Amino acid sequence: MISIFDLVAMLLTLSALFGWINRRFVHMPHSIGLLVMGLVASLLLVLLDVAFPNRHLYDALTGALRQIDFADVVMNGMLAFLLFAGAMTLDLSALRSRAWPVAILALVGTIISTVVVGGAFWAAAQGIGRPISLAWALRPVSS
């Protein structure tokens, strides 16, 4: 059985290895290079699983991953680091020069998203015979 510590150590090692391979050989922007190499590694693992269907290559890994509450890990563990990394690369002078368009697009985008998702949820509920009020479909989700 793989422990959480072992899983984190493997992920950090793979990230460092993929980052080094990207910088040394691939020369893509860092985040895109890591994404592409992660995708290629995932596809190779899936192909291995298809090529050897009688082998249970991922039983230990699957068991370890099922122990993790990913919503909790992302919201309480990784979100602060992701926001910090994004803030470190932010060009404040460029943001200041575009403050009004950014604010208006953020506000309008949020309103449009709320109406589209809430309206689709309301329509789907009506369609399956479980009607809900439109106000309930548009309300914010709380945890």
Image (cartoon, rainbow, N blue to C red):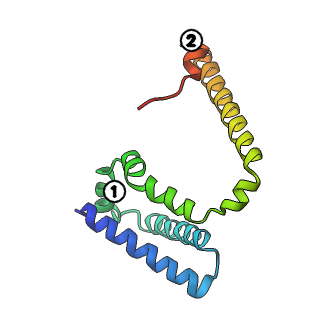
Q: Nearer the viewer, residue 1 or 80?
A: 80
Query: Image point 35% across, 71% down: which residue?
Result: 10
Residue 81: image location, x then y, percent? 45, 59
Question: What quarter of the picture does the N terminus occupy?
Answer: bottom left
Q: Which residue is mark 2?
A: 131
Q: Which disc is residue 122 wearing?
A: none
- Residue contact at pointers 2 and 1, CB within 8 angstroms: no
Amino acid, disc 2? Pro
Give left or right: position of 81 versus 62. Answer: right
Binning the other alpha carbons within 10 Å of mark 1 as few (below 14), some (14 to 19) or many (20 upward) gives: few
Residue 35: image quadrant is bottom right
Depth-wise, is mark 2 or mark 1 nearer the camera?
A: 2
Image location of residue 39, percent across then percent down: 55, 66
Q: Nearer the viewer, residue 67 or 27?
A: 27
Q: In this rendering, would 82 be left or right of 126? A: left
Q: Position of residue 112 (x, y in %)?
A: 70, 32
| In this view, 24 is above or below 57 | below
Q: Amino acid at mark 1?
A: Thr
**CA separation in Å, label 2 and label 1:** 38 Å
Rendered location of residue 68, percent (x, y): 32, 51
At 57% from the left edge and 20% from the top edge, which residue is drawn? 137
Q: Is residue 35 above or below residue 138?
A: below
Of residues 49 and 9, the one drawn nearer to the viewer in this rendering: 9
Q: Is residue 22 above or below residue 8?
A: below
Residue for badge 1: 62
